[in-house]
Image (cartoon, helix red, strand yellow):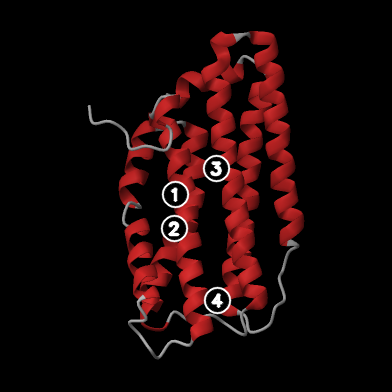
Amino acid sequence: MLKRWLAIFQKDTLMDHAYHRSFEMFDILREMFTTARESLRHMEDTEIGIDIYDKDLEVNRFEREVRREVFNHLAVSGPERLPSGLALVSIIIDIERIGDYTKNIVELALNHPGKLHGAKYEEDLQRVEAAVEENLAKTKSCFESCDEASALELLKKYDWVNPVCDERLMELVKEEDNSIRPGDAVSLALYFRWLKRINSHLRNVITSVVNPFDRIGFKPKKK
């Protein structure tokens, strides 16, 4: 489906520019996520290598810019271009939400004393972190190429992430491991939750490659 919209984007300077802005947003998000994870999990102090708030403001600025360009495009082109414009705005909102959750992780890192260790959940936590970081890169590539086969593969490859995050979160709520300090338990629960949400928004973006506008964010229908 995205391939059809891409053909429309390429015929219009505003839409094409808005579409390519999304690639820049993905690059910023990857840098933000890597920095946030490194600070929370591997650093004893609260030093952050980049100004995460400036990066978040940049993502927000790009989102507003895309909305303006899509609106101006639709005002000129008329209702026949409405689905492609709405789809791009929907995708940009998902990208911006990833930035918000990444900022939350940084704020957690700034307030958690020392490195956050996953205790009995460390192995699963590392798997989820690696999957989310990898998915960030692959989602951008898939979105750029509009490769439907790749999109379906990504949806399948990372469909285990959300259930694992939910399971570990509920185990933390039930206090199944009393050796974990309360502060660490709260931090781990929040971190698992935010990793799940980032992964969910990435999945929403991927579904735009294979689904019509009304099914963005939902599983593709089996053919």
Task: Name the residue type under label 2.
Answer: Lys
Query: Disc 1, disc 3: CB below 8 Å?
Result: no
Which residue carries the number 4 mark? 41
If you read the primary sequence from the N terminus, does the residue marked by circle 2 or circle 3 appear first? 3
Q: Does the residue at mark 2 contact the one at mark 3 (Cβ under 8 Å)?
A: no
Q: Nearer the viewer, residue 146 or 218?
A: 218
For marks 4 and 2, give the CA distance.
17 Å
> Cβ–Cβ below 8 Å for labels 1 and 4?
no
Task: Tell me the CA gap for discs 1 and 3.
Answer: 9 Å
Q: CA distance from mark 3 to mark 4?
A: 25 Å
Judge from the rendering whether residue 174 lies leftward or rightward of residue 146; answer left or right.
left
**Relative to residue 159, is residue 74 drawn left or right?**
right
Q: Secondary structure at mark 3?
A: helix
Q: Is 124 rendered above or below residue 79? A: below
Q: Please name the residue that numbered disc 1 is placed on.
A: 200
Q: Amino acid at mark 3?
A: Asp
- In primary-sequence order, the first of circles 4 and 2 is 4
Lower position in the chain sequence, tag 1 or tag 4: 4
Mark 2 closeness class: few <14, some 14–19, many ≥20 residues within 10 Å: many
